[in-house]
Image (cartoon, grey):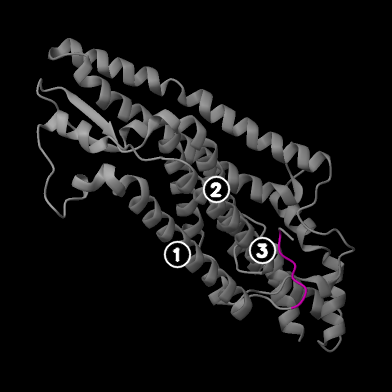
Amino acid sequence: MENNLIERYLYDVVRRLPEKQRKDIEEELRTLIEDMLEERQKDRGTEEVKAVLSELGEPAKLAMKYRGEEAHLIGGEYYPIYCQILKLVLICVGVGVAISAVVHLVVQLPAQGGGMNGVVNSVVDGFISLGSLPEALLSAFGLVTLVFFVMERNQVKLQKKEPWSLEKLTQIPSAKAVIPKSDSVVGVFFGVLIMVIFIALPECIGYWGKNADGELVAVSVFNLSIWSKVIPLFVISFSAGVVDDLVKLAVGHYNRTVMYVSIVCSLISVAAVTICLKGYEIFNLHFAEELSAITGETFSAKYDILTHWQSGIASRVLPNFLLAVIVLITLLELAVTVYRTLRYGQKGKEASCLQ
């Protein structure tokens, strides 16, 4: 019992620290606890262990001391989560802007004409597009910082604030309940990246090729005439997925908080996608015609998708197929979350950093 209390206490402290500091501080704390127990010159029982741990104090405050936090803009229990989310958001925004600039460069290169002058003009345009990177990063930094600043100054707690006691120590999660950070980071990265592409570069998703004059042209598979109407739905859907992954990243293991957030985010995401695919003609019904005009090819084979594109593929088959795939993947991911939570997650009253 006493060893379990010590391990839970150490886990609750070091999980709030930067990874590179965790091992050294855990060894230091373990030695300190052993020394304090020896100084009491009593049998090492549960009551002595409880007294020593209570004397060390609340794990969150002890972790704060090890981080050396004093005056701060964002601190306390908010700081570790703030750093994780800020780093991830800045990476996603930076990559998104960089990809937009590269695509802009590729699209504009043929339009500038041949020769060195055309190449130079295209490169200059690409760098001009990259000029928005500092502004985008600064805006992302300011937005994330503002959100956490308001939360801290208004005492919006990430967990229920009750008097600390040893009974409220976080349970050490099962190895099978731990959520790899890489999974959450990849989910957030691609969620933001796809959202940027769908919002800023929908015209580039489709066919790329040269026309009869040798110019590079793109034919979008999407119906861009209604794109301003469906963008909010895309943002809602992808944002729900990003929030789900951010919560998993912050908590680090499956528990009821993660499960409930996943259920809500999945419902929101699927609802937004359903409205988008069933309520709007998001695919370009004239895609096959435009492609035929550019390439000079005719599509008449019986089993060629483009042959039946306008008569049913774009309006019914493809939207229904995509919706079915999205719903199936969402249900599978949700089933894994629910199963791991109920099977391996902590039981009873949990104490995660987001409860």
- Label 2 sits on a secondary structure element that is helix
The answer to whether residue 334 is left or right of residue 162 is: left
Q: Nearer the viewer, mark 3 or mark 1?
A: 1
- When the figure is inspected, residue 103 is found, relative to residue 78, above or below; the finding is above
Q: Which mark is residue 272?
A: 2
Residue 125, image x, y percentages: 32, 16
User: Which SS type dominates the magenta stretch?
Assistant: loop
Tell me the residue that label 3 is attached to.
260
Query: Which label's residue is closer to the chain start, 3 or 1?
Result: 3
Name the kind of residue labelled 3 in the image: Tyr
Q: Nearer the viewer, mark 3 or mark 2?
A: 2
Disc 2 to disc 1, C-alpha distance:
15 Å
Q: Which residue: 83% across, 85% down?
A: 46
Taking depth in this image into account, of 304 and 191 the one nearest to the observer is: 304
Name the kind of residue labelled 2 in the image: Ala
Taking depth in this image into account, of 197 and 13 the one nearest to the observer is: 197
Q: Is residue 200 visible?
A: yes
* Span shown in magenta: 348-353
Q: Assess whether residue 12 is covered by the magenta stretch.
A: no
Tell me the residue that label 1 is attached to.
328
